[in-house]
Image (spheres, grey):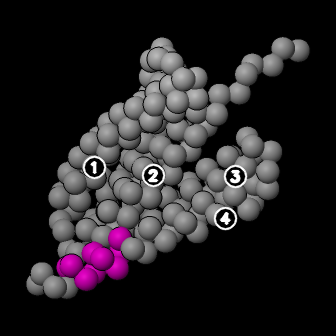
Amino acid sequence: MKHLPRDDSFIRNFVFGVEDSLVSTVGLLSGIVFAGVSRTDVIITGVILIFVEGFSMGVGSFLSEWSAEEYVLQHETNFRKSAKSAFVMLISYLVAGFIPLFPYFFVGGNKAIFISIPISLVTLFFLGIGSGRFSKVNTLKDGLRMLIIGGLAIVIGVVVGKLVGYNSQ
């Protein structure tokens, strides 16, 4: 059986895109909900964040992958591989960003946050498990690592949101 060559840029960009999108989006949403922002403003802010950051992450992936490949090969390279990496980053960021935002379309901010945070944490956990399985390492350990690190970003968003919300009233 012929094996396809492993493309580490695919898994790197997929995991980075999903993780960063979940953590950034749920952290921001948690912070602005605890700051007292209206449900409509939460949704608008979330959608803007997801698209702007998704594009920014895709461009960043494109430029960094291209630069790294030129560095390793020591000559100019074709942009195709870098474009694929950017596309993976963009799509994974866009899709994952709507996971924590989704509850806000149906439930008010204070209730939606208690759906958004657990869904995001569970998704991070399973992302870690999937990454560990793909890499053939301890899946539970990778799942817990992703869960804990992502959870810290949520705590930061909540604390900053409470501080800013309290001070602005």
Q: CA distance from mark 1 to mark 2?
A: 12 Å
Identify residue for label 1. 49
Q: Which residues are magenta?
A: 157-165
Q: Verify whether residue 163 appears in magenta.
A: yes
Residue 103: give x, y in percent of width and height: 37, 56
Q: Verify whether residue 76 appears in magenta.
A: no
Amino acid at circle 4: Leu
Give the residue at x 30% y 70%.
Answer: 31
Identify residue for label 4. 144
Name the residue furthest front.
74
Q: CA distance from mark 4 to mark 1?
A: 26 Å
Residue 58 is at least partly visible in this image:
no
Amino acid at circle 3: Ile
Identify residue for label 2. 20
Badge 1: few (under 14), some or many (20 or more) residues near its Cα, within 10 Å?
Answer: some
For mark 3, give the secondary structure. helix
Q: CA distance from mark 2 to mark 3?
A: 16 Å
